[in-house]
Structure formats: structure tokens, C-alpha cells
Image (cartoon, rainbow, N blue to C red):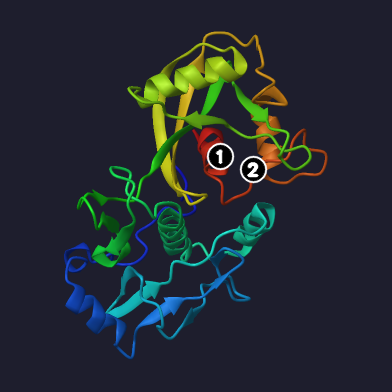
Amino acid sequence: MPPDVFFAGPGLDRADALRGEPARLEEFAQSPDARQLVWDGGLPALDAEGRLCWELVTDPALFLGLDGDRPRFSPVAAGGGDLRAQFGALGYLSATEAPLFAAATSLASWHRRHGFCANCGQPSGIVRGGWSRQCGACGTEHYPRVDPVVIMLATHEGRVLLGRQPRFPPQRYSALAGFVEVGESLEAAVARELFEESGVRVSGVRYVASQPWPFPSSLMIACTAEAAYDALTIDHTELEDARWFSRDEVAAAMAGAQGASFAAPPPFAIAHSLLAHWLNA
């Protein structure tokens, strides 16, 4: 089994059966135990211990679920902010709070970007406690979307292929990744992305784990695959560099050893869990 994946977990009881009961949701919002998320800089705010911040309910637009019997809500908070600074905040986000952080961030972002009906172009409104929108003109109901992304390690003779994008911090290398395209299986997406970005042909694709990634609404699907050869043809429109790394090099990077040949992805990224899984296999 893979290591624990950040953002992945049960979070709150989402109470799906109650989302279609407006009177019950209003009752929840009036409860003395009800709270709503505090937002800051386009993300749910965190306290000094990395836990989510809550306040009395004034805008129960989004029903996040139940924490035991305590209702939890969120406004559709304003987006924006420096994405690098936002990622920096993830370094001290509590792992137990991360699933709710991911759900609230993705849900609020979806509402900010989908105010109009994709069927007829008219304004839509929030229904079902924020877990869908409905067009007032044609009645079409729209649901929050999730974009599947494959992220994968190609292996060859005890080494693993990692790539570097120009936006990465200095020395960082990570697993290659890409969106699943329409009419494509996960296995086909893994093979296509690896060939497009590195020129490597693979087989034996294996699923490892998944992670909700709330920037804005991806589902990262981690896999491994076996490379037929190690010669690389790098697509420099996608990658600054790509290299094969030995098990010892990966172990040193994951341990943060001085003089490691690269900097590993951070613990909140599923690439980190994928590398840990490969090391322990």
C-alpha cells in the first residue's frame, strides 16, 4: 500500500442526503454549533498550528458537511492571491485538516468560475447546499467538475525518471504528469504523456494512489510504468530537463541530505508519496 497521501482522507461527513433539503440546511445554519470557514488570500485561513479557522455563520452558501453533529459552511470566497505564497501555506497545513481544505477550496473555486449555464448561457444559481448549480432559464443542473491528471514514474533497471519544469524551485525534480484526454484510459494517458514529454515508451502501467488537488479541481492519479529503454528525447516546451535517478539518489533527496543530486517534491505533493512508494517497494 502507498504511504498516506496529503489531501486524501474522509474529511467531514458530507451528508449528501441532506443537501436537497433547503429547510434543513437553513436549520443547520441557525444552529449555535454552526461555523463557516474564514478565508484569507484566496484560501481557507490557517492558524499558527496549521488548523482551519472558523467563525459564526453569516454566509452559508456552501454546506461542507457535518463535523459530528456540528454543521460546517463556507462562503464563496474571493479567489486570487499569489499561487507561490499559497503553496507555501501548505507546508504547515495540518494533515487532518487537509481533506476539508481541499474540498472547500475546489468547491468555492468552481462556483466562482461557473456562474452561467453552459447549456444556454443564462445565469445559474447555487442549489443543494452548493454541490450543484441550476439554470433559472432552462433548468439544467451543473455539478462541480474534477479534471483527472496522471502523474507517473517510469522505471528502468533500478532507476526512475524525473523531470523539471522552469517554474520549479531550484534543483527540484518531480514525477512527470499530464491531463487525461477525452476518450482515453488512464493507462493510455500515462504512456502518451511519458512519450510526449520524454520520448520513452512504457508498458506495465500500475495504479498506486490518488489525490484531490484543489488548484483548482484536479484529481491526481499516481502510477508507475516500466520503460523499454532509457534514451530521452525531452520536449522542452514542457520540461526544462529530465533525468534518470538511482535509488540512492532518490533516497538522499527524500531525506533532505546535504549534497543530494536533486531536491525532492514537498510532502504535500503526491509525487512525494509516489517516490516513497517506489523506494519502499
Answer whether residue 208 is visible to the viewer in this image.
yes
Dividing the picture into quadrants, the one containing residue 172 is: top right
Q: What number of labels is visible?
A: 2
Answer whether residue 1 is visible to the viewer in this image.
no
Residue at 54% across, 15% down:
195
Residue at 52% across, 43% down:
270
Q: Is residue 92 left or right of residue 153?
A: right
Q: Is residue 274 left or right of residue 36?
A: right
Residue at 24% across, 58% down:
136
Q: Which of the marked residues, 2 or 1, is nearer the chain's N terminus?
A: 2
Q: Position of residue 259 (x, y in %)?
A: 83, 39
Identify the residue at the far right of this view.
259
State the separation of the CA atoms marked 2 and 1: 6 Å
**Residue 215 drawn above or below residue 159:** below
Dividing the picture into quadrants, the one containing residue 88 is: bottom right
Tell me the tag on residue 120.
Answer: none
Q: Position of residue 267 (x, y in %)?
A: 59, 50
Amino acid, disc 1: Ala
Tell me the residue that label 1 is attached to: 271
Is 217 or 243 nearer to us in this picture? Answer: 217
Q: Position of residue 62 (x, y in %)?
A: 35, 68
Amino acid, disc 2: Pro
Is 209 or 136 nearer to us in this picture? Answer: 136
Q: Is residue 198 left or right of residue 211?
A: right
Q: Position of residue 107 (x, y in %)?
A: 40, 58
Q: Is residue 197 left or right of residue 100?
A: right
Q: Do the residues under discs 2 and 1 have CB atoms within 8 angstroms?
A: yes
**Residue 182 drawn above or below residue 269:** above
Q: Secondary structure at mark 1?
A: helix
Tell me the residue that label 2 is attached to: 265
